[in-house]
Amino acid sequence: AQSLGALGLRHKLHVGTAVDMAALNDANDPEYRRLAASEFSSVTAENAMKWESLEPTRGTYDWAAADQLVEFAKRNRQSVRGHVLVWHNQLPAWLTAGVADGSISKQELRELLRRHITTVVNRYKGKIWQWDVVNEAVSDPWDTPSTLHYKGFWAQNLGPDYIADAFRWARAADPRALLFYNDYNIEAFGSGNPADDKSQFVHDMVKGLLAQGVPIDGIGSQGHLGTQYGNYDTLQVTAALKRFAALGVATAFTEVDVRSELTEPGDSAEINPRLQASAANFSVLMKACLAVRSCLSYTVWGFSDRHSWVPEWFDDPPQGMATIYDENYQPKRAYHELKSDL
Ligand code: XIL
């Protein structure tokens, strides 16, 4: 049988996964490595390219894990999505503490960001297909104030101009990598719910940046969905991608998973509807991606429930079952559905 990766390439679509380096290196878990290598045509570091992983101590970069992933991809003829250059989470403690106690000034912070982007992009120059340059810069409707705005550490400390700066610095370091803005809650448009406003905000932001000549090549829609929110609509997801594409940029689904609230042990009657709803949502995003030429890749945020960020991050109520293989690496309905879409 053909892999998801091979089937995707027939449509010029890369099907990728986020990779957990601890799992990849676990000698007692060879199936993880086997599937990561064989089933996907693209890989992303789940954590290994985040600033806190790369520069845990100021001035000392530790490239080991990120290098290893890039090598792995090369060996398996996979493309790499670089994730992530600028984000408000998983920053090194020395950086956030230095800003908090005033020992790092605004001017120095901007210079540290410039240096970080330049250093990382330059190290992997020619080896990264798409970079997530800026991640999750826009607030959510449930934030305060509820009016959409630029949120988080970077906007607070540098003002929103850091976004344009980041893209320019990334382009200067590797003119060939595709530079993405990446965010969540922008997957659909036209549902009438507040996520429409966020999709619109990101659309207008990118339009404005392009008008100023900022080098931005793509918009990534993360795709962290949940079965408790009902099924996404293929037309609305397609509409969101098409509106981005109309700006002249590429698009991608960058972190797809579909979580479910977990039932009490023994409540197996609830399992099947969830597997079905999960598969339906994975499939909606895939169908939309296949329908829009600008959609270059579809990346799942982990491929097995054995290694997924969901149970750790969504625990009230407990959630899980978010990926396309179960804990024993048995393909779930979502896997088969993606295959039939391809
Ligand atoms: C998550 C990882 O999966 C976790 O292992 C880590 O502890 C926290 O970050 N949006 C993103 C990703 O852009 O980088 C996040 O990854 C998930 C949400």
Image: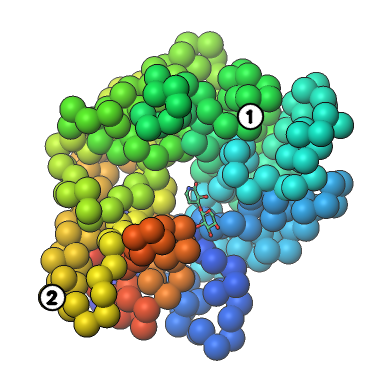
Mark 1: amino acid: Trp
Is residue 298 visible to the viewer in this orientation of the structure?
no
Q: Is residue 222 above or below residue 54?
A: above
Up the image or down, 8 lies above or below 323; here it is: above
Q: Secondary structure at mark 2?
A: helix
The quadrant the C terminus occupies is bottom left
Secondary structure of the residue carrying numbered label 1: helix
Mark 1 or 2, which is nearer the eye? 2
Residue 317: which quarter of the image?
A: bottom left
Marking on residue 269: 2
Q: Nearer the viewer, residue 157 or 117?
A: 157
Q: Residue at x 63, y 48 (%)?
A: 90
Which disc number belongs to residue 258?
A: none
Q: At 84% from the left edge and 47% from the top edge, which residue is drawn?
A: 58
Q: Is residue 281 left or right of residue 127?
A: left
x then y, percent, for residue 295: 33, 40
Q: Tag 1: Cα neighbours inside 10 Å, few (<14), some, or many (≥20)?
A: many
Asked whether 48 or 268 is in front, the reply is 268
Whether disc 1's CB lies below 8 Å from ligand 1 is answered no
The answer to whether 159 appears left or right of 317 in the picture is: right
User: Residue reaching furthest top?
Assistant: 212
Mark 2 Cα within 10 Å, few/some/many (few <14, many 20+)?
few
User: Which quadrant of the view contains residue 75?
Assistant: bottom right
Give the CA separation, mark 1 to mark 2: 46 Å
Say which residue appears at 70% left-offset and 37% top-offset: 117
Of the image marks 1 and 2, the number of the one nearer the N terminus: 1
Q: Which residue is under mark 1? A: 154
Q: Quadrant where the N terminus lies?
A: bottom left
Say whether residue 104 is left or right of residue 200. Answer: right
Position of residue 206 measured from the top left corner of the image (x, y, whole percent): 44, 21
